[in-house]
Image (cartoon, rainbow, N blue to C red):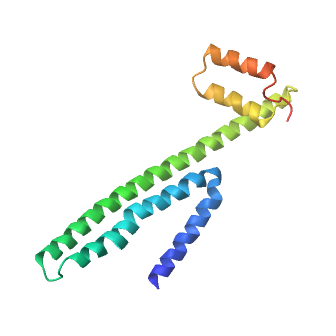
Amino acid sequence: MTASVFFSIFLAVMIEVKKRSGPYHKFFIPSFISLCWIFVVIPFVVCIPLLAILFNHDAEKFVSLIKGSLTGLAFLLMIGVTILAIVVNVFFQKLEEEKLVKFIVRYLQKILKQNAVSAGNDVVRRLVEYFRRKVTMTDMEQLKKDLIEDKFPIVP
């Protein structure tokens, strides 16, 4: 009964993450599932039951197996939680970065429109990307060349 409640909550959380993450769900969901397999399913469902079958339950080795497996699993779970926290942190940083870029693109489009210049999202996004990284004169020359050769349509 408790397992079905936890599974239902887990499934609802995964569906919500998939809805909210947009293009990042192609990275986030498989990595989360891989972490679950590596740190939960394989140790708890495969390794410990198989090792428990091999030992006599009254033997001293069985007690040391249980102690060692619990210690190892606790260590694996700590590593799994740490990796999951890092992945989630990177994911949310990417989302914040994307929000910032979208805001800058909208703001630049508004300024360009006030100056009677119409530019699509892809052109302004390319400009923002040029200025976000270290801009050199060769980058600016390449940008001018790309815009003059009409590789990017100016009118949306």
Which quadrant holds the C terminus? top right
Residue 6 percent location from the top left of the image: 48, 76
> In the picture shown, does residue 4 fall above or below 91?
below
Q: How many labels does the image show?
A: 0
Residue 112 percent location from the top left of the image: 81, 28
Along the viewing direction, whichever of 49 and 66 lies nearer the viewer: 49
Question: Viewed as shown, does residue 119 lie left or right of 77?
Answer: right
Quadrant position of residue 148: top right
Residue ID at (61%, 64%): 16
Residue 2 percent location from the top left of the image: 45, 82
Along the viewing direction, whichever of 151 and 155 lies nearer the viewer: 151
> In the picture shown, does residue 119 fall above or below 1?
above
Residue ID at (17%, 76%): 62
Question: Viewed as shown, does residue 138 lie left or right of 110?
Answer: left
Quadrant position of residue 119: top right
Question: Viewed as shown, does residue 156 lie left or right of 1?
Answer: right
Quadrant position of residue 39: bottom left
Residue ID at (81%, 24%): 150
Residue ID at (83%, 29%): 154
Along the viewing direction, whichever of 111 and 132 lies nearer the viewer: 132
- Toward the bottom, the furthest residue is 1
Residue 7 percent location from the top left of the image: 50, 75
> In the picture shown, does residue 120 fall above or below 135?
below
